[in-house]
Amino acid sequence: MIKEGEERLREDAGPQKGVFCKNTGVVLLHPFLPRFFQSIGLTGEKEKVFQNNKKRSGAVHWLHYMATGETRASEEELTFQKFLCGLRITEPLPPVSIDDKKHLAMADDMLRAVIEHWKALKNTSPDGLREGFLQRSGRLTQKQNGYLLQPENKTQDILLGQLPWGLSVVRLPWMEHTLWVEW
């Protein structure tokens, strides 16, 4: 399934020009995503991969919520989230409801945990994290050894130097290829 999604990115984006995407800053959340998706039942406990396409689509919408605080999204806002979850970036998603109050609270708690671990953010709110970092446009390009994400730069990016986890190489359990990040 992932292989198919990545093959489709090659078709959709081409190897050189790439695709411009919204909310690419969600890549910052990568160490927290497997546990979050498992805790809300989207991935298995041991395998930590999506159990089916409906759950994979749900994960796309959860990533959008984490980036924006909004429970609804247009297709154009979901391009990077689709890629990160292994779906074709041009494939329309079925409607998915992410209005479970318990899961919404868990997503917000996860953002608070990110802030707590990233000491440089101090008293930043989840919305501050969203606006400052997660809602960042960027370019996604296929490379020989995986994919390259280049989020746009902003002044507050100086705080990325104090990020307590790696960001230059991302490989989530459900990803077949490596994502290289140049931020």
Image (spheres, rainbow, N blue to C red):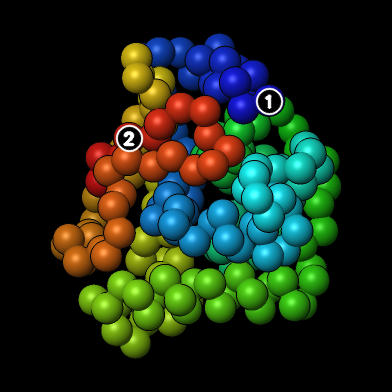
**Left or right: 106 with respect to 125?**
right
Mark 2 belongs to which amino acid?
A: Trp
Image coords of residue 10 (percent x, y) = 51, 15
Give the residue drawn at x 58%, y 38%. 174
Q: Is residue 104 above or below residue 41?
A: below
Q: Is residue 134 above or below residue 79?
A: below
Q: Which mark is residue 1?
A: 1
Give the residue drawn at x 66%, y 78%. 105
- Tell which circle, 2 or 1, labels the residue nearer the N-terminal end: 1
**Left or right: 66 with respect to 113?**
right
Q: Secondary structure at mark 1?
A: loop
Give the residue drawn at x 17%, y 61%. 161
Q: Classify mark 2: residues with Cα within 10 Å, few (<14), some (14-19) or many (20+).
A: many
Question: Are dots 2 and 1 in contact, CB under 8 Å?
Answer: no
**Left or right: 22 with respect to 4?**
left
Give the residue drawn at x 47%, y 78%. 112
Q: Is residue 47 above or below residue 32?
A: above
Distance from label 2 to label 1 (Cα)?
21 Å
Image coords of residue 7 (percent x, y) = 57, 15
Mark 1 belongs to which amino acid?
A: Met
Q: Is residue 84 among the parts visible in the rendering?
A: yes
Q: Secondary structure at mark 2?
A: strand
Image coords of residue 157 (percent x, y) = 22, 59
Q: Which mark is residue 180?
A: 2
Q: Which mark is residue 165?
A: none
The image quarter containing residue 150 is top left
Q: Is residue 60 among the parts visible in the rendering?
A: no
The image quarter containing residue 70 is bottom right
**Which quadrant is home to the N terminus?**
top right
Towards the viewer: 158 or 175: 175
The image quarter containing residue 64 is bottom right
